[in-house]
Amino acid sequence: MRNKCEHGITGNKTDKRYKGRLKEIRRSKEQQSDGTSIDVYTFVITRALGTMTYTFRGEVPIDLRQYFTPGDRVLHHVGCAIPELLDKSKTYKVCMDCGAVIKRGQACCPFCGYSFI
Ligand SMILES: [Zn+2]
């Protein structure tokens, strides 16, 4: 199994579910030591009492800025940098743990095994 910390969530002990609205999604490139670059997504989630920022680093098959729109209602899951989109109108979803694109209705991610229930 993968180490949940690798995607940039720090302070896992205090990480908890966080429901709010997506205020901002940013994408940048980060240079790795072997010369390749990886995508870095930053999610800013706001709610009445505060703001949280989560950072995802890794390869994803789509540009997550096309999946998430600022203003969307989202739920952050403990240990996952990618929030869950609470709007169920899309026919697919993005795994909160690994960023894979999968069909809606699956109980767990076929790529990383993360359970959505
Ligand atoms: Zn996954």
Image: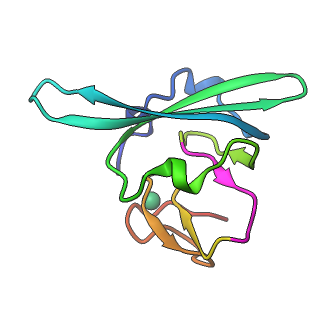
Residue 65 is situated, as x and y percent measured from the top left of the image, at 52, 47
Residue 22 appears left or right of 31 = right
Q: Quadrant of the C terminus?
A: bottom right
| Residue depicted at 37% across the width and 34% down the height | 6
Q: Quadrant of ligand 1?
A: bottom left
Residue 21 is situated, as x and y percent measured from the top left of the image, at 78, 40
Residue 19 appears left or right of 4 = right
The stretch in magenta equals 82-89
Look at the image and tell me whether residue 96 can be seen: no
Kindly report the secondary structure that dominates the magenta region of the rendered protein.
loop
| Residue depicted at 88% across the width and 22% down the height | 49
Vertical order, 61 against 104 (above or below)? above
Vertical order, 102 against 97 (above or below)? below
Residue 64 appears left or right of 14 = left
Look at the image and tell me whether residue 25 can be seen: yes
Residue 112 is situated, as x and y percent measured from the top left of the image, at 40, 60
Q: Residue furthest left?
A: 34
| Residue depicted at 75% across the width and 58% down the height | 86
Numbered label tally: 0
Q: Residue furthest right?
A: 48
